[in-house]
Image: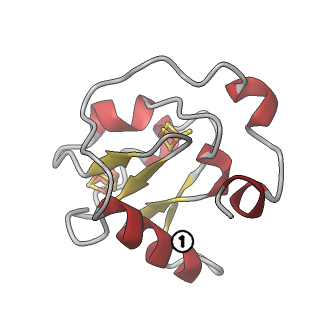
Amino acid sequence: TYVVTEACIMCKYTDCVEVCPVDCFYEGENMLVIHPDECIDCGVCEPECPAEAIIPDTEPGADKWVEMNTKYANAWPNITEKIDALPEADAKAEEEGKLEKYFS
Ligand code: SF4
Ligand code: F3S
């Protein structure tokens, strides 16, 4: 599976949702997640994200994101169409520590 990681937090460019063939993105207030059980591993969303927030679960450190994506994909609504990015997206894209800062 692929998962959405920290770079998405406070950005939500949503270019990813437009290309997903199985519509497995879910929308929270500050970020999107992928439902790991629905993702078919096609990889087309990965290069679409301007923040480079999408990674395959084979990448080192991906485990906590798989857990997080699973948790929230089961709680948040599905999103299938692109919407406006959050207002500070460009400024926040590379900020670190966003998970702790905005999800605690
Ligand atoms: Fe959707 Fe493919 Fe991305 Fe999985 S890898 S979320 S199926 S576009
Ligand atoms: Fe987030 Fe990138 Fe999609 S910032 S909403 S994963 S395009």
Q: Is residue 45 visible?
A: yes
Which residue is labeled 1 in the image? 65
Total numbered labels placed on residues in the image: 1
Q: Where does residue 2 sit, x and y in percent of width and height? A: 41, 64
Q: Where does residue 99 sit, x and y in percent of width and height? A: 69, 60
Looking at numbered disc 1 in the image, what kind of residue is underneath it?
Trp
Q: Quadrant of residue 101?
A: bottom right
> Which quarter of the image is occupied by the N terminus?
bottom left
Q: Is residue 57 visible?
A: no
Could you tell whether 76 is left or right of 100 in the image?
A: left
Instruction: Report helix, strand or loop for mark 1.
Output: helix
Q: Where does residue 72 sit, x and y in percent of width and height? A: 39, 62
Q: Nearer the viewer, residue 42 or 89?
A: 89
In this picture the colour scheme is secondary structure
Q: Name the outermost residue toward the front.
A: 104
The residue positioned 53% from the left and 34% from the top of the image is: 12
The residue positioned 31% from the left and 60% from the top of the image is: 75
Q: Quadrant of residue 33?
A: bottom left
Could you tell whether 33 is left or right of 88 in the image?
A: left
The residue positioned 39% from the left and 71% from the top of the image is: 71
Residue 42 lies, with reference to residue 11, above or below; the image says below
Label 1 Cα neighbours within 10 Å, binned few <14 / some 14-19 / many ≥20: some
Q: Quadrant of residue 69?
A: bottom left
Could you tell whether 92 is left or right of 25 in the image?
A: right
The residue positioned 66% from the left and 19% from the top of the image is: 87
> Which quarter of the image is occupied by the C terminus?
bottom right
